[in-house]
Amino acid sequence: MEPREQSESMNNLENDQNLSTEPQNEAQEVVNEEVKVEAPEAEAPAAEAPEAEAPVAEAKEAAPEPVEEPKATPKLDLTGKSKSELVDMMREAATRPIEDVKDEVQAIKAAFFALRREEMSQEKEAFLANGNEEGDFVPKEDVDENNLKELLNVLKERRTEYNAAQEANREANLAKKRQIIKLINEIANDPDNINRQFNRVKQLQQEFKDAGEVPATADTEIWKEFQRATERFYDVLKVNRELRDYDFKKNLEQKQQLCEEAEALDEETDIVTAFRKLQELHNKWREIGPVAKELREELWARFKAASSAINKKYQTFFEDRKSKEKENADAKTELCEKIEQITTDNLKTYAQWDEVTKQIIALQEDWKKLGYASRKANAALFARFRKSCDDFFAKKAEFYKTMKDELSSNLAKKIDLCERAEALMESTEWKEATDKFVEMQKEWKTIGPVVKKHSDAVWKRFIAACDHFFEQKKKQNVNVHAVEHDNLKAKKEVIATLKATIEEAAEDAAQTVRNLMDRWQEIGHVPFKEKDKIYAQYRELVDKAFETLNMRGSRSSGEGSSRGPRQSSGSDRGLSERDRLVRTYEQRMSELKTFENNMGFLTANTKSGNSLVQEMERRIARLKEEIAELEQKIKELDNADAQ
C-alpha cells in the first residue's frame, strides 16, 4: 500500500468525534457560553413533583426540577472544508435565528481552529527550521480568522440580545403568574361567592399553565405558590358535590394511567429513552388537576416510586459510561505509547517498511474497535495518535520518493549492461569475451534493485545475452573436442606408419621418418588425457628410428617439446619439457579461475542455465585433474635434474 493511501486510511478513524480545542487567542471564548452543549451525565435525575391537591402543610415537597435531555451532536459534515468555506458557512449561519444555530456554530468554530492550529504549527516549524528562537515566533495574520472572529462577535451580540429578550419574557411570565395566583387567592378569600367562581378558577389554572417559562430561580417557588393557592381554593370550595367528584374522578383516572406508564418504563431497554419519556410523564402530571384528598398521598407515592427506579437506572447508566470511558482512555493511551515507540531509523528496505506499515494499520484497527473516552480526553488522544500515524506515513512517502530515484538510476545501469552484453554475445574471441562477461556479471551484482515491474524483464534480457554467449562457446568447445579426436586418429596413423618404416628399413626410410616427423608437427592438439600416452609412443619410435637408421641432426618431437640428438644431455631435454609443462600449467590455472568465476555467477543468478552449469562443473573437474598431473610431472622433472 502506498504511503498516501495509508495516510488517507486514518481520515475515517474518528469521523464522528468532536475536536473542539481552539488556539489560545481572544476568539476562543467568544461564543463558548452561547454554544455550550451539556454532557448527558450533567443532567439531574427527574425530581418528584408533589400532588397539586396535597394539604398546604404537605406541599413543602420539592417541585420537579426541569432537566435538560441529552443534546444530540449536530449532524454537520465538515469533512474536507477549507477555512474560507467554514467562514462562509458561519456567515450563512449568522443570518438564521440564533436559537437554531448554537451547535452548528460550535462545530464550525472547532473545525476552523483545528485547521488554523495546523497552519500555525507548520509556520512555527518552518520558523524554527530557519534557526530562529521559539520565543520570537509570531504567527502571521490570517484574514479568514479575522472574519470568523467578527462573525462570532456578531453572534455573541445577537445571543446577548436574544437572552435579554428571553429573560424579559420570562420576567413578564412570572408577573403574569403572580397575578393569577393573586386572583385565585382573592377568590378563595370570598367564600360567599366561591361557588360561582369555579369555572373562573379553572380558566385561571389554564392561563397559569399557558403563561410560559419563568426565570429558573423563581420556577419552583412560583409553582409552589400556585399549588398552595389552588389547594386552598379547593379546600374551602363549597361547590356542587357531583361536579367536584367528577373532576376528582377524571384526574384520578389520568394519574393512574401515568403511574402505569411510569412503571412500564422499567422494562425499557434504552435507559436514555426511558428517562426522556419519564420527563414527559412528569410534565403531564403537573398539568392534571387534584384528586380526592384521601388518595393524594398514596397516588403520589406510587408515581414517585416508579420515577425513582428510572432515575436510579439512569444515574447508574452514566456512572457505568464514565467507567467505560476511563477504560477506553487508558486503552487509547496504551495504543498511543505503542505507536510512539515504533522507530523508522533502521528501515532501509521496502520489506522493512511494509512490515512496520502492517503494525501501524493493526494499531489503527485496534483504535477503531475502542469506544469513546470523555470528550476532552478523546480529542487529545486522537490528536496524539493521528500525529504519530501522519509522521510515519510522511517518512514512508519520503523513503519511497528517495528509493524511486535510486531505482531509476539502477535500472539505467542494468540496461547499459544489457546493451553491452548484447553487443558482445556474438563474439568469437572466446577468452577476451569470457573475461568481459565475467566482469559484467560481477558489476551486475554490485547494482542495487530496480522497480519490480522492470526487474524480471531487465534480468531476463541480461541473462539471455550471457546464456547465448556461453552456449555458443559450449558449442565451440564441442567442435574442438571433435577436432582433437580427429588429430588423435591422425597421430596414431603417423605412429603406425613410422613403426612400419622402421621395420622395413628401406633406403629412403630416413627421409620418410623426417616427413612423418613434419606431419606430426602439423597435426593439432589431441585430447589431453591421450596427449602423454600418444607422445610417449611417438618419442619412443623416433628415438628408435635415429638409432636404427643411423639418423643425425635435430629431432623435433612436436607437442611443444624439443629433443636434441641422442648424445644431448638429459638436463637439456628435461628443461625444455619442464618449460612446456609450466606454460601448460599456467594456462590451465587461468582457465580454471575463469570457469570458477562463471560458476559463481550462474549458480547465484540463473535457473535456465542448469545444463551449462553441469558442463562447466565437468570442465572444472577435468581441469583440476590436468593441473594435478602437470604438477606431478613438473615435480618428477625437478627431482630428475637434481639427481
Image (cartoon, helix red, strand yellow):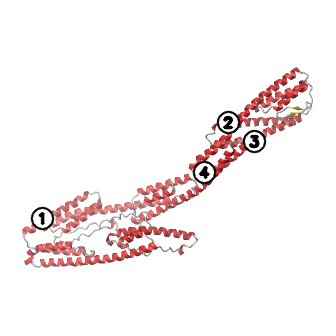
The disc, 4 or 2, on the residue closer to the chain's N-terminal end is 4
Identity, as a three-letter code, of the amino acid under mark 2: Glu
Q: CA distance from mark 4 to mark 3?
A: 32 Å
Residue 374, how many percent across, how many down?
A: 39, 64
Residue 127, how many percent across, how many down?
A: 55, 71
Report whether 362 appears left or right of 487: left
Q: Quadrant of the C terminus?
A: top right
Identity, as a three-letter code, of the amino acid under mark 4: Pro
Q: CA distance from mark 2 to mark 3?
A: 18 Å
Task: Identify the disc placed on residue 449.
Answer: 4
Q: CA distance from mark 4 to mark 2?
A: 30 Å
Q: Which residue is mark 2?
A: 615
Is the residue marked by circle 1 packed among few (<14), some (14-19), or many (20+) residues within 10 Å?
some
The disc, 1 or 4, on the residue closer to the chain's N-terminal end is 1
Identity, as a three-letter code, of the amino acid under mark 1: Lys
Task: Identify the disc placed on residue 214.
Answer: none
Q: CA distance from mark 1 to mark 3?
A: 124 Å
- Relative vertical location of residue 562 with respect to residue 278 in this rendering, above or below: above
At 80% from the left and 31% from the top, the residue drawn is: 523
Query: Which callout, 4 or 3, points to the residue nearer the camera?
Result: 4
Residue 16, how many percent across, how many down?
A: 39, 61
Query: Which callout, 2 or 1, points to the residue nearer the camera?
Result: 2
Contact, mark 1 vs mark 4 (Cβ under 8 Å):
no
Q: Which residue is mark 1?
A: 249
Task: Identify the disc placed on residue 590.
Answer: 3
